[in-house]
Amino acid sequence: MKDRLTHTDQAGKASMVDVSGKPVTARIARASGTIAMLPDTVAAIRDNRLKKGDVLATARIAGVMAAKKTHDLIPLCHPLPLADVQVDIDEIEGGFQVATLAKTTGQTGVEMEALTACSVALLTLYDMAKAIDRHMVIGEIKVTEKAGGASGNWSLEAVSERGA
């Protein structure tokens, strides 16, 4: 573990990380999260019966749009030229799981873009279904994988397998 946080200067003030000396490498990040809801809400979304329209398609588009705006939303994030953003939404027992992928070729990672895509897709699901279900719970938002850059590759699955 490093001795100091990367987004603070020597005096402890918030600052953007200078990545100008880093090599350009291919980078990816994956994130996931869940939203729990009533069974009738799951069915209404799955069967496209909500008055607001196609909830799943809207949530996917919202996630992609959010990833592209991450630097506008999160202070000190670098604007990145995203090569790809994918938002997959799968029905799970009692709700939906959102899984995102962000890719770039650059000097800094795309974890925040993957997390932002996931979070906004989940928030969109909530927003579009809140008229019929105010008991939805968003949770378990996490980075599940990252690759590229000086710190190398990491996956939550590999960490879980080691018991760490």
Image (cartoon, rainbow, N blue to C red):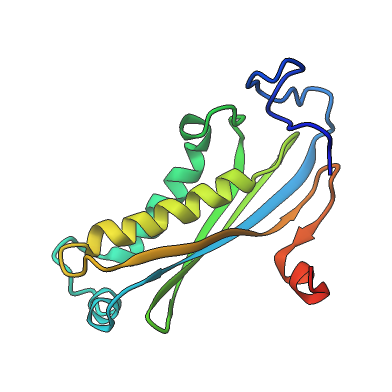
Residue at the image point whose x is 50% and y is 44% from the top: 67
Q: Is residue 132 left or right of residue 5?
A: left
Q: Pick whichever, 140 or 44, lies toward us.
A: 140
User: From what the image shows, is residue 109 above or below residue 23?
Assistant: below
Q: Which quadrant of the structure image shows residue 159?
A: bottom right
Residue at the image point whose x is 73% and y is 47% from the top: 27
- Position of the C terminus by quadrant: bottom right
Q: Which quadrant of the structure image shows residue 76?
A: top right
Q: Pick whichever, 22 or 129, lies toward us.
A: 129
Residue at the image point whose x is 40% and y is 63% from the top: 138
Coordinates of residue 62 in the picture (x, y in percent): 38, 51
Residue at the image point whose x is 84% and y is 46% from the top: 151
Q: Tally the numbered discs.
A: 0
Q: Is residue 80 left or right of residue 139?
A: right
Q: Which quadrant of the structure image shows residue 66?
A: top left
Q: Is residue 60 left or right of residue 58?
A: right
User: From what the image shows, is residue 146 above or below residue 48?
Assistant: above
Coordinates of residue 91 in the picture (x, y in percent): 41, 78
Q: Pick whichever, 76 or 49, lies toward us.
A: 76
Coordinates of residue 125 in the picture (x, y in percent): 32, 62
* Residue 67 showing in the rendered view: yes
* Residue 58 showing in the rendered view: no
Coordinates of residue 24 in the picture (x, y in percent): 80, 35
Q: Is residue 57 left or right of residue 16?
A: left
